[in-house]
Image (tube, rainbow, N blue to C red):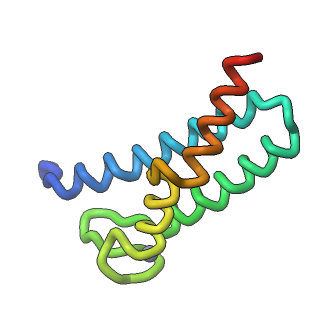
Amino acid sequence: MSKTPSVADDAVVLLCADIYGHLDEMEFVAGGSTDPLLAGAVRSAVLVLRGLVAEHGTLRDATCWACGGEWPCRVFSTVHGLIKNPDGEYVALLRRLRAAERRE
Ligand SMILES: [Zn+2]
């Protein structure tokens, strides 16, 4: 019989899904850009962020796979802060890409 996931287990899954969702959206929107240099730069940045999130993930024991410490670790928290900061460059770039997409 399988164990019912805890609230913390579900929170980990939701947090990771949220971050991956933002990265997917960034990649998708950049793919529609008419500026190939910008699109390539965004795809490269998303690839790096996706790799960091995957490497610094966790499962049920809330221990970071890469750091071995308590999860969310410093690297994961930094990536999360970069992606979710409403005044940060990531959000600003996403807004510009969305605006350009609407004009096309
Ligand atoms: Zn870590």
**Quadrant of ligand 1 in image:** bottom left
Q: Nearer the viewer, residue 69 or 42?
A: 42
* Residue 96 drawn at (x, y percent): 66, 35
Is 32 left or right of 3, judged from the image as shown?
Answer: right
Outermost residue, front side: 87
Where does the C terminus fall, quadrant-wise?
A: top right
Depicted 95 relative to depicted 61: above or below: above
- Taking the image as shown, residue 100 lies to the left or right of residue 16, namely right
Residue 92 picture location, percent across and down:
60, 44
Looking at the picture, tell me which residue is in the foreground, 15 or 29: 29
* Front residue of this view, candidates 15 and 37: 37
Residue 79 percent location from the top left of the image: 50, 63
Query: Quick check: 35 above or below 47?
Result: above
Which residue is drawn at the image coordinates 27% and 70% (left, top)? 62
Judge left or right: residue 1 versus residue 37.
left
Question: Which residue does the image show at 30% across and 56% down from the upper left?
Answer: 12
Q: Nearer the viewer, residue 62 or 33?
A: 33
Number of numbered discs: 0
Which residue is located at x 78 percent, y 41 percent? 39
* Residue 41: x %, y % from top left: 78, 51
The residue most toward the bottom is: 68
